[in-house]
């Protein structure tokens, strides 16, 4: 009987630990409009934050200049969209450029490892050609 109660307690504690971890996972991620997980998508967090700041500046600036509330809200929404899209495009472009550079470096390192010391090594060919041309240039002229 006691062992059965221990098993039930272990099951209850393991169930509560699973629910706590599920709760932590669900609170850690933030989904914007239910579709965009801001934590997992690159550039999403920065773009949304800059968009919010841009909308505040645009809307408040327009309101202070014209004192038209409805039009200022429209300008704020437009500022949010333009700032968010601008930051998103800029960030994604830089990430794509960085990934391309990393890919080129990885391929270069892989080729260096493969060809180092072999007859296909480009550095060895260059050194061989330079040494040969130096020998020719060092010959005394007759």
Image (tube, helix red, strand yellow):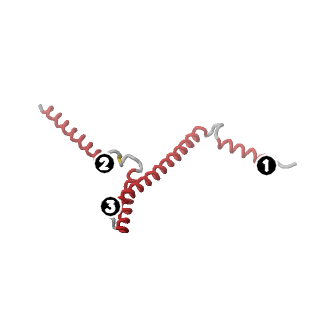
Query: Could you tell me if the residues under marks 1 and 3 are in contact, i.e. CB atoms within 8 Å?
Result: no
Q: Residue at position x 66%, y 42% from top?
A: 124
What numbered label is drawn on residue 65? none
Most extreme residue toward the left is: 1
What kind of element bears circle 2? helix
Residue corresponding to mark 3: 70
Above or below — where is 60 with respect to 32? below
Place of residue 56 in the rendered image (x, y in percent of width and height, measured from the top left): 35, 61
Label 1 environment density (alpha carbons within 10 Å; few <14, some 14–19, many ≥20): few
Q: Nearer the viewer, residue 70 or 88?
A: 70
Q: Residues within 10 Å of mark 3 (few under 14, many from 20)?
A: few
Q: Tag 2 or tag 1, which sits nearer the N-term?
A: 2
If the image is split into quadrants, where does the N terminus sit? top left
Q: Is 112 in front, or is 92?
A: 92
Mark closest to the chain's N terminus, 3 or 2: 2
Per the model, the C-alpha gap separating discs 1 and 3 is: 82 Å
Q: Residues within 10 Å of mark 2 (few under 14, many from 20)?
A: few
Helix, strand or loop under label 1: helix
Q: Which mark is residue 137?
A: 1
Q: x and y percent of residue 134 in the render?
A: 75, 48
Q: Is residue 130 left or right of residue 20?
A: right
Q: Which is nearer the N-term, disc 1 or disc 3?
A: 3
How many numbered marks appear? Answer: 3
Q: Give the camera-side residue of 64 and 4.
A: 64
Measuring from the top left, give residue 41's x and y in whole percent: 39, 46
Q: Nearer the viewer, mark 3 or mark 2?
A: 3
Query: In the shown orientation, is residue 39 left or right of residue 136?
Result: left
Q: Which residue is mark 2?
A: 28
Task: Tell me the distance, in whole angstroms, between the alpha carbons under discs 3 and 2.
Answer: 35 Å
């Amino acid at each position: 009987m006691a062992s059965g109660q221990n098993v039930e307690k272990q099951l209850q504690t393991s169930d509560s630990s699973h629910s706590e971890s599920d709760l932590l996972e669900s609170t850690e991620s933030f989904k914007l409009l239910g579709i965009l997980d801001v934590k997992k998508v690159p550039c999403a967090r920065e773009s949304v934050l800059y968009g919010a700041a841009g909308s505040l500046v645009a809307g408040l600036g327009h309101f202070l200049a014209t004192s038209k509330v409805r039009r200022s809200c429209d300008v704020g929404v437009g500022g949010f969209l333009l700032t968010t899209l601008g930051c998103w495009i800029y960030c994604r472009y830089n990430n794509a450029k960085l990934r391309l550079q990393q890919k080129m470096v990885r391929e270069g390192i892989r080729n260096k490892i493969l060809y180092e010391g072999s007859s296909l090594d480009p550095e060895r060919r260059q050194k061989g050609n330079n040494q040969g041309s130096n020998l020719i240039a060092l010959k005394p002229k007759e």
